[in-house]
Image (tube, rainbow, N blue to C red):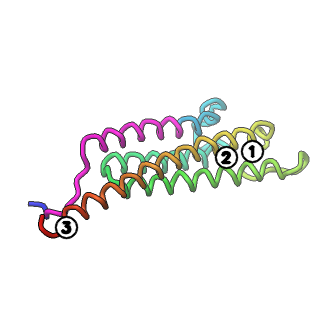
Amino acid sequence: MMAPDTYTPDAGKITTVKWLAFFLGLAVLFSVAPVIYMGQWNVEQSAWWARLVLLLAGIQCVYIVWMLSTPDWAAVWVVMLVFAGVATLYAVASALVMATSGDETIPLGMEEVRHRAGAWCGAVVAVMTLATYLCGRLSTKWRRAVELELAGRRRPGR
């Protein structure tokens, strides 16, 4: 038996988390599009940038699945932090590509995608930032609702 002040999410919140996970999955798929397009699936032979993209996508997918298995405002908040971190890494990559002159080599073997990498990283930053915002907004509203519900349960005379 659970304590009377234990919070359990309602069906609406669980459905919202499922939809959020779907859209986050689309964002991750969007971020790996260059790997798919360039045929860089073989991690042993792919460029380092493709390996890093696949690693980040894998980490994001693990956290999305974890969020689905534990639908709570805190899980959504953690996923928000993961997506914010990934957006930051893509912003750094975009700045790195744009700041490197044409005759210098770019780290992670991005020479073959130099002409598109800056714009692509910028697009991924925009998508990941939107995903971060959606997670943060849902998590904050959900946490506030939980706090109000638990405060109502603890009120004297109830």
Where does the magenta region start and end? 4-28
Is 27 in the magenta? yes
Viewer-side label of 1, 3: 3
Q: Amino acid at mark 3?
A: Arg
Q: What residue sits right under mark 3 in the picture? A: 155
Disc with the residue nearer the chain's start (3 vs 2): 2
- Residue 137: where, in percent of width, then height? 46, 50
Q: How many numbered marks appear? A: 3
SS label for mark 3: loop
Residue corresponding to mark 1: 110
On whether residue 96 falls in the magenta region, the answer is no
Q: Which secondary structure is most common in the magenta stretch? A: helix
| Residue 12 relative to residue 74: left or right | left
Q: Is residue 112 left or right of residue 59?
A: right
Quadrant in the picture for residue 123? top right
- Badge 1 vs badge 3, beta-carbon distance below 8 Å: no
Residue 21: quadrant of the picture: top left
Front residue of 71/109: it is: 71
Q: Residue type at mark 2?
A: Trp
Residue 155, given in percent of the width and then of the height, sits at 19, 67
Mark 3: give few (<14), some (14-19) or many (20+) Cα within 10 Å.
few
Quadrant of the frame with the N terminus: bottom left
Q: Three-letter amino acid code at disc 1?
A: Met
As drawn, the residue found furthest toward the left would be 1
* Label of residue 74 in the image: none
**Can you say whether 112 is above or below 74 in the image?**
above
Q: Which residue is mark 2?
A: 49
Task: Name, please, the residue furthest toward the right.
Answer: 103
Q: Residue at the spot x=25%, y=41% of the render?
A: 11
- Separation of marks 1 and 3 at Cα, in angstroms: 60 Å
The reply to whether callout 1 and callout 2 are in contact (CB within 8 Å) is yes
